[in-house]
Image (spheres, rainbow, N blue to C red):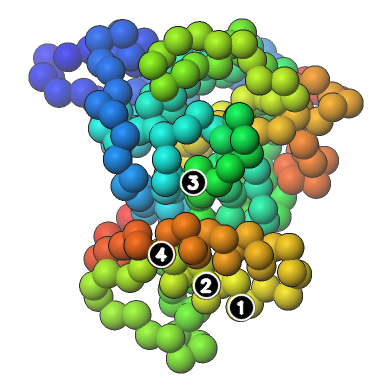
Amino acid sequence: MAQDLGAYLETESPAGFAPRPYYGAEEDSLTFYLRNDESYARRIDERVTVFLSFDKDELVGCQVKGVRRHLQRFGDFGVHITKGKIRLGMFFHILAFMIPEPERRARYLELGQATKDVELDTGELVPP
Amino acid sequence: MPNGPPKYWTLRGASPTGSGTWEVRIPHALVEHVQRYGPEHKFHELRLVKEVLELPTVVFEGLREEQEEGLCYAGVPPCRYSNAGARLPVPPGRTFLVFVTVFQWRWEEMDPAMSGYPLDWRTRFGRQKWPKT
């Protein structure tokens, strides 16, 4: 097994694509790609960055910061999420209602629609 | 000698002081996730991470709004990668960012007035560590 990243990249190949969220507990950040399209990032606000395809600027994925913190905050609004799975789309829809600016809210709603079938296991959202 | 990959990969990057180099750690869990689930071009882009860490156009300290620690290296590498691993021309108006401490890498829109700098760099980031202003 390579002990050098350069050698690792030469010997390993990507296994393909599967839309699977990555949660980084140390940074409390979730990254999710819907599609395999080559993309660049556009920051929406301090919470959300979207990934857009190079060729058509279409939504390809997103990164959300402070997932665990937001879920705790939802409790203040009477939305209690206990252990189990939540739909990522619902997460974006709830956040959208907290945003007064129409353009930003529309982007959150777009993300909510795009991720409506993506499940997030709250058991994975544990602090490091 | 361990059989598996290390918990962290290390790369040497330009020191944010502007003098010499230093080690940057990349969690293997993140590399492995990208290798297994893609997107495939993100895996190949790890080659660009090394290039921008070694020869950045600019290094910023901290993300202002989130009051985060950490550094952001930005620069324009010689190419981008397709999902198949082919080298393609650099997308116009884009710069490549590498975030250190909370490790991430991605293309973003470039400030048209400052080659290699990301858009809104004045409001997004804290102090510019390098080049010294």
* Outermost residue toward the front in this view: A56
B16 shown above or below A58: above
Contact between marks 4 and 2 (CB within 8 A): the answer is: no
The chain that hosts pointer 1 is A
Q: Which callout, 4 or 1, points at the residue further toward the start of the chain? A: 1
Please report the residue visible at 59 percent of the width from the left and 49 percent of the height from the top. Answer: A49
Q: Which residue is mark 3?
A: A61
Contact between marks 2 and 1 (CB within 8 A): the answer is: yes
Q: Which residue is mark 1?
A: A97
The Cα atoms of the two marked residues, 3 and 2, are separated by: 16 Å
Please report the residue visible at 51 percent of the width from the left and 20 percent of the height from the top. Answer: B49
Q: Which mark is residue A116?
A: 4
The Cα atoms of the two marked residues, 4 and 2, are separated by: 9 Å
Amino acid type of disc 4? Lys
Please report the residue visible at 50 percent of the width from the left and 87 percent of the height from the top. Answer: A76
Amino acid type of disc 3? Gly
Q: Which callout, 1 or 3, points at the residue further toward the start of the chain? A: 3
Q: Which callout, 3 or 2, points at the residue further toward the start of the chain? A: 3
Q: Which mark is residue A93?
A: 2
| Image depth: mark 4 or mark 1 in front | 4
